[in-house]
Image: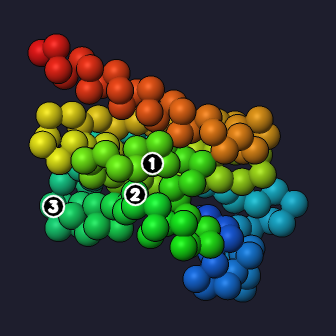
Amino acid sequence: QKSGYKNIDISQKNYPIPELQMEEPQAWELKMRGNPKNPIRNKITAEQASRLMYEIVTKKAVSSTASSQMMNLLERNLDPTVWKQQESNPIQGFLGESLAGLDIRFFSKVGWTSETRFEVAFIQSKSGQVAYILTVFGDGTEYAENWQIFPTISRLVYDQMKALNSQS
């Protein structure tokens, strides 16, 4: 609220959480959702997610120290030998999958349900010449069930950003 965000709620966890063996909200988390017939859900726009990622990257979210801690939590290893070992990973079917093998750093937050697929990512070449935030929110089962659309979008954007940079 102090930062000027309006109508945002990012208080709910994403499920399932395999490492905690939680398929759905339980106990405290279930109570936090309120009325089961009309539960409280996370609410954020693509613009707000992009702004929040920008503020984290530029160390302006909460504080410089907190932003650095958030960056550590958001950094993803794009090596398939690493992420393919994870039962539920934030790479396969998302923006990072098509960027494996590139000389980049990748930071992201995904959201996925049976009816949605969302992601905000900060992608930066290790040389620092290419750096951008890509946010894609897909609402509808056609996005939730499509494991290729996000990787395809991501690679197209990366290739264009790299091409634009090489022309400069």
**Which x, y percent locates residue 111?**
59, 53
84 to the left or right of 49: right
Give the Cα separation between the discs numbered 2 and 1: 7 Å
> First in sequence: mark 3 or mark 2?
3
Give the Cα separation between the discs numbered 3 and 2: 26 Å
Look at label 1 and name its amino acid. Answer: Gly
82 to the left or right of 21: left
Q: Is residue 145 visible?
A: yes
What residue does disc 3 label? 64
**Which x, y percent locates residue 68?**
21, 64
Rate crowding at label 2 as few (under 14), some (14 to 19) or many (20 or more) other CA atoms within 10 Å.
many
Q: Is residue 43 visible?
A: no
Judged from the image, the secondary structure of the residue bearing numbered disc 3 is helix
Q: Residue furthest right?
A: 37
Label 2 close to label 1 by CB (< 8 Å): yes
- Mark 3 or 2, which is nearer the eye? 2
Label 3 close to label 2 by CB (< 8 Å): no
What residue does disc 2 label? 78
**Which x, y percent locates residue 129?**
14, 34
Q: Which mark is residue 96?
A: 1
Label 1 close to label 3 by CB (< 8 Å): no
Look at label 2 and name its amino acid. Answer: Leu
